[in-house]
Image (spheres, rainbow, N blue to C red):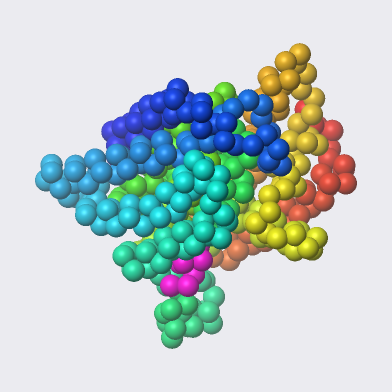
Amino acid sequence: MIWLSVVGFLVAALAAGLVVRWGNEHALVYGEAMPQRFHLGAVPRIGGGALLVGMCVSWGLGVWQTLGWGDPGSLRLGPWVGAWLVTVLPAALGGIAEDMTQRLSVRYRLALTGASGALAVLLLDLTLPRLGWPWLDSWLVIAPWLGWCVVVLAVAGLPHAFNIIDGYNGLAGMVALIVCLALAHVALQVGDRALAALLVSTAAATGGFLVWNYPRGMLFAGDGGAYVWGVVIAMASISLVQRNADVSPWFPMLLLIYPVWETIFSIYRKAVRGVSPGVADALHFHQLIYRRIVRGVFHDDESRRMLMRNNRTSPYLWGFTLLTVVPAVLFWNNTLLLMAFCGLFVVSYVMAYLAIVRFKVPHWLRH
């Protein structure tokens, strides 16, 4: 598993470096007037391609190790990994196409992530066997199609949730890396080495991308990167719960509550204002932190000053994520506690959001 991680990291880092070297012309496609733009200069947004290459090479080598080396008991990977890659491709290629052209509408991208969700059900036989509430679990037994619908919704929606939080250097990438490692940790706790290998390899490829993304901001993940993270993590989360009865379905929910709730809250506040959920704005939680908390950065060069503010924003959200990841890892089999922490996060998020909007942030949090 370690050498797969090393290979995934190196391949992703090398591919990302090539994108940085030869992707300057593509960077000009991204308009200057986008509301979610918080950098100066032309930066390529196709880092998702490098992430996908590193992940695919690492997964492929894992299958080769299991089958070619005659060591099926180590990683336990097999031809079924190919079905995982096939499932990831519609969403990933759709995101990369949008990054390359800026012409693929939200509707088409949602259809492609939905296609990945449908493939997860058809090719991988993924379903959600339980929700942690006996009366709902009985409905899942009576009507198994409800579990399939949850799978499609999760695989279709989580990529867009990661795309929403992908606003600053290292933000979405580090959240994805932390979540992958947390899922891998619990997978190892229950003896699911195959799933752990896929997750650790994905985390390693993410690390290779982050070499160029944070803190220098020379490459962005784009929609392609967000969609790769979203689909892989959604499938891994559901698969972990489906294959291991000891794992609470609220464990991945708490791990991912930040991007999930950010998406739900974004839809709500846009609906209140009569704005379509697909319209980009600059009122997300991470954007408010950038505008109203990370302000005391001084430098003569404007681009350098903006980069420094950009880099100082992400650690706030890393800490926010760790506040949910730590209890999730500690209590991964305790449904009631996990549900309580999810509720606590939602309340904390709303209170923090309102405090920032009303300029009631403690002075010790400001830079």
Query: Residue 329, percent across and down?
Result: 50, 50
Q: Of 226 and 223, which appears nearest the observer?
A: 223
Vertical side of 250 occupied by 11: above or below: above
Q: Is residue 166 left or right of residue 113?
A: right
Q: Of 229 and 363, which appears nearest the observer?
A: 229
Which of the image's four quarters has the N terminus? top left
Query: Residue 113, percent across and down?
Result: 47, 58
Which of the image's four quarters has the C terminus? top right
Residue sitting at x 71%, y 38%:
33
Vertical side of 122 occupied by 43: above or below: above
Residue sitting at x 80%, y 25%:
296
Residue sitting at x 31%, y 32%:
7
Q: Is residue 96 visible?
A: yes
Query: Residue 301, percent across and down?
Result: 72, 15
Residue 193 lies within the magenta run: no
Name the dominant secondary structure of the magenta segment. Answer: helix
Q: Is residue 11 left or right of residue 312?
A: left
Residue sitting at x 66%, y 29%:
39
Query: Residue 106, percent across and down?
Result: 58, 56
Q: Residue furthest top?
A: 300
Q: Of 113 and 256, which appears nearest the observer?
A: 113
Vertical side of 236 occupied by 301: above or below: above
Residue 155 lies within the magenta run: yes
Q: Is residue 182 visible?
A: no
Residue interval drawn in magenta: 148-156
